[in-house]
Image: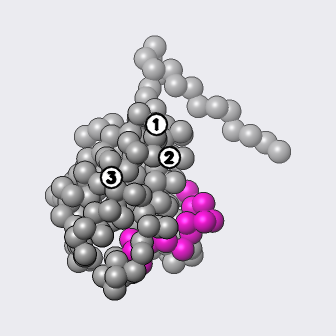
């Protein structure tokens, strides 16, 4: 089997940092999200987990609450320290990537439906700003979990603790969302 030569991190005598962005609405963050974030953090020098506004979805939680729950969940899970949590609500996702020097977007893919949805966006992001997209498959234990499923279960009074970090389960229970 032929393998590509490893990419040199040296260019013009300067170490190039590998920076990636994991975008999502994280409304709320799930254990599946944390799995993808954890594995992506091991692939890059710096990982920005970016809470974005999705105009096609009706948000359950305000962006500021999603950011704070993500930060708390990442800390409680003991994820690597190369993770930066931020939010972005105006402009193109690739604009954020350019601002922070990221050349890669990381997306979790649960099914063919996700592939069909994400592929055109990946192509456009590459065309707009030479930002590549890497798809990560979920841990099979979390492949069925989505934020919308969690929102639905929570709204009907069900137990979401098997699907979300402790901080999220506690917040949703207190809020009776």
Q: Name the quarter where the N terminus is drawn.
A: top right
Identify the disc placed on residue 38.
Answer: 2
Mark 3 is surrounded, within 10 Å at the Cα level, by few (under 14), some (14 to 19) or many (20 or more) other residues, namely: many
Extent of the magenta region: 136-150
Nearest the camera: 64 or 133? 64
Residue 20 falls left or right of residue 112? left
Nearest the camera: 58 or 54? 58
Q: Is residue 93 visible?
A: no
List the residue tagged with mark 1.
80
Q: Is residue 158 visible?
A: yes
Among all residues in the image, which is located at the extreme bottom? 156
Report if residue 101 lies within the magenta region.
no
Q: Secondary structure at mark 1?
A: loop
Q: Is residue 13 above or below residue 50?
A: above
**Earlier sequence position, callout 2 versus callout 3:** 2
The picture places residue 84, in percent across and down from the top left corner, at 33, 40
Q: Name the quarter where the C terminus is drawn.
A: bottom left
Identify the disc placed on residue 70.
Answer: 3
Q: Verify CB contact (< 8 Å) between mark 1 and mark 2.
A: yes
The picture places residue 94, in percent across and down from the top left corner, at 31, 51
Mark 1 is surrounded, within 10 Å at the Cα level, by few (under 14), some (14 to 19) or many (20 or more) other residues, namely: some
**Earlier sequence position, callout 1 versus callout 3:** 3
- Residues under labels 2 and 3: Cα distance? 12 Å
- Residues under labels 1 and 3: Cα distance? 13 Å
Q: Verify CB contact (< 8 Å) between mark 1 and mark 3.
A: no
**Earlier sequence position, callout 1 versus callout 2:** 2
Q: Secondary structure at mark 2?
A: helix
Nearest the camera: 84 or 130? 84
Residue 97 falls left or right of residue 37? left
* Residue at (55, 57) in percent of width and height: 136
* Residue at (53, 58) in percent of width and height: 135
Mark 2 is surrounded, within 10 Å at the Cα level, by few (under 14), some (14 to 19) or many (20 or more) other residues, namely: some
């Amino acid at each position: 089997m032929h393998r590509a030569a490893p990419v040199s991190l040296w260019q013009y005598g300067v170490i190039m940092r590998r920076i990636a962005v994991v975008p999502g609405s994280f409304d709320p963050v799930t254990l599946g999200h944390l799995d993808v974030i954890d594995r992506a953090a091991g692939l890059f020098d710096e990982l920005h987990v970016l809470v974005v506004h999705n105009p096609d979805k009706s948000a359950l939680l305000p962006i500021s609450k999603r950011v704070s729950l993500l930060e708390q969940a990442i800390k409680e899970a003991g994820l690597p320290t190369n993770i930066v949590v931020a939010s972005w609500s105006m402009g193109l996702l690739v604009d954020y990537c350019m601002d922070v020097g990221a050349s890669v977007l990381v997306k979790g893919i649960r099914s063919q439906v996700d592939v069909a949805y994400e592929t055109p966006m990946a192509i456009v992001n590459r065309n707009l700003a030479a930002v590549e997209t890497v798809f990560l498959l979920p841990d099979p234990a979390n492949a069925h979990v989505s934020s919308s499923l969690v929102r639905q279960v929570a709204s009907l009074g069900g137990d979401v603790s098997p699907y979300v970090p402790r901080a999220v389960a506690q917040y949703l229970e207190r809020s009776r969302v």
